[in-house]
Image: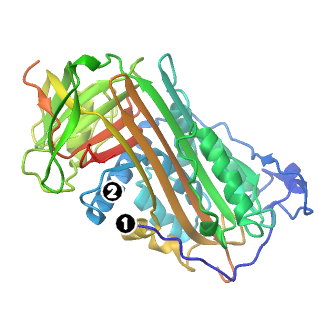
């Protein structure tokens, strides 16, 4: 999955504090060069105050995108445990999308399942960011941060600074990406380490930054206590059939009662966190389902809606909270109460996703034909997409973290029975009001930590 081939022969250009006074004065404006050795600081564009918008279609878009990535990744490595953050990955690529133009923008919007464009997109992204940053409460910590890193010799359009400030509350920090990638990697990794509370200390290797002029980063941290913790004295070992068909002995947390629903052969259970703003949805396929199976979008929307979370908005579904399921969802049954046996898991994944994203339709964004001139007149194409995520699920709750780095090259050209999760299953940590998928995981073998 690694895609770290060095890219050489790319020149350096720059970002300057001197142009800060002009930020927001027009789409064609760029920040200008800055004297070497100037003190690094964060530059912020002017965030527009957009009309109120519904963030739930963006939760649906991020869910669809996340499942696409999870499905393609599983097919590439069908026996592996996988964890990713659709939210983080969509944010990193979303900041790149704001600088994309023409066919590049069209391809990115399609792969990211973006529901709008223009001012409607700006309002939706602002609502999405605000919803994410409002999820913390007693017993629950959610911290999300976005940042653009630019080499001191590369220009950025003022309009782009305004766009990332509006949609992602992101500023721009300068790092010597071209002349000193070792130092730049250290600075970016330190920021990610701090943002993820030490869970992701080494997102970027210095070698991966060779030739890179800009890096767009997202970091996400979650520490959430269950609304009803599992009793540790009930935790016991039991068998699990792995994705490879072997038998493993894993540690099961046992408890109930939890709300459950079924649709299209999938059974889902909702495990709420304290405060009710977040829930984990555990999704178990029918016995004998093929490896790397994913629930249909309509069925997933029905399941999450019936479990009490608005969830992804499937095509044709109502956007009103608390409404029923969607047509074509496979005849979802009403919710019931059940006890569950859920494995304790401690997952971590780190990979370069550029190649995988190319298979999903983002190839144009990675080649010399890409158009990111909305970001900078010197921007060529995406040179790296690095993603790392961790997920720990235990009796008290969930601790998870994720980070994404999207690097761009400068141009030199252009009650009931117990439900046992005893076979591979999916986990989604979602915001109950918007369906935003903070984390997604496919558990193939809980014994392989």
Local SS, label 2: helix
Q: Which residue is mark 1?
A: 360
The picture places residue 291, in percent across and down from the top left corner, at 17, 56
- Asked if residue 224 is positioned above or below residue 435 in the image, the reply reads above
Front one among 53 and 265: 265
Mark 1 burial class by Cα count in 10 Å: few <14, some 14-19, many 20+: some
Q: Check residue 68 in the rendering and tell me which mark sits there, or answer none.
A: 2
In the rendered image, the quadrant that contains the C terminus is: top left
Residue found 57% across the figure and 36% down from its top? 197
Q: Which mark is residue 40?
A: none
Q: Does the image show residue 101?
A: yes
Return the residue nearer the eye: 449 or 273: 449
Residues at discs 1 and 2 in contact (Cβ within 8 Å):
yes
Q: Quadrant of the N terminus?
A: bottom left
**Mark 2 burial class by Cα count in 10 Å: few <14, some 14-19, many 20+:** some
- Residue drawn at x 39%, y 66% as measured from the top left: 356
């Amino acid at each position: 999955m690694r895609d770290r081939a060095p890219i050489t022969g790319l020149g350096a250009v720059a970002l300057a504090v001197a142009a800060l006074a002009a930020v927001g004065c027009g789409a064609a404006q760029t920040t200008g060069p800055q004297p070497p050795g100037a003190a690094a600081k964060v530059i912020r564009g002017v965030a527009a105050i957009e009309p109120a918008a519904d963030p739930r279609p963006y939760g649906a878009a991020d869910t669809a995108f996340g499942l696409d990535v999870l499905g393609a990744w599983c097919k590439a490595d069908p026996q592996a445990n996988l964890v990713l953050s659709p939210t983080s990955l969509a944010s990193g690529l979303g900041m790149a999308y704001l600088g994309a133009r023409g066919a590049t923008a069209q391809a990115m919007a399609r792969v990211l399942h973006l529901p709008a464009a223009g001012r409607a997109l700006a309002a939706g992204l602002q609502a999405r960011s605000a919803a994410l940053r409002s999820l913390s409460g007693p017993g629950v910590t959610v911290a999300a941060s976005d940042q653009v890193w630019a080499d001191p010799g590369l220009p950025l359009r003022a309009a782009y600074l305004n766009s990332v400030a509006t949609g992602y509350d992101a500023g721009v920090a300068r790092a010597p990406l071209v002349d000193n990638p070792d130092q730049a990697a250290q600075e970016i990794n330190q920021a990610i380490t701090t943002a993820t509370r030490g869970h992701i200390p080494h997102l970027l290797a210095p070698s991966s930054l060779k030739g890179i002029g800009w890096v767009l980063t997202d970091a996400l941290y979650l520490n959430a206590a269950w609304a009803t913790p599992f009793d540790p004295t009930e935790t016991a070992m039991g068998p699990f059939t792995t994705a490879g068909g072997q038998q493993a002995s894993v540690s099961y947390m046992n408890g109930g009662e939890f709300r459950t629903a079924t649709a299209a052969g999938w059974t889902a259970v909702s495990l709420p966190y304290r405060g009710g703003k977040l829930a984990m949805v555990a999704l178990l396929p029918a016995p004998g389902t093929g490896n790397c199976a994913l629930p249909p979008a309509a069925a997933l929307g029905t399941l999450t809606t019936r479990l009490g979370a608005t969830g992804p908005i499937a095509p044709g579904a109502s956007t009103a909270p608390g409404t029923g399921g969607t047509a074509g969802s496979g005849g979802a049954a009403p919710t019931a109460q059940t006890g569950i046996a859920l494995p304790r898991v401690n997952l971590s994944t780190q990979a370069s996703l550029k190649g995988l994203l190319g298979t999903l339709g983002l190839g144009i964004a990675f080649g010399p034909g890409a158009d990111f001139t909305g970001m900078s007149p010197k921007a060529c194409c995406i040179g790296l997409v690095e993603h790392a995520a961790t997920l720990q699920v235990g009796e008290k709750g969930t601790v998870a973290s994720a980070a994404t780095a999207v690097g761009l090259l400068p141009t030199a050209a252009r009650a009931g029975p117990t439900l046992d999760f005893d076979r591979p299953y999916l986990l989604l940590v979602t915001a109950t009001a918007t369906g935003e998928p903070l984390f997604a995981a496919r558990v193939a073998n809980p014994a392989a930590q």
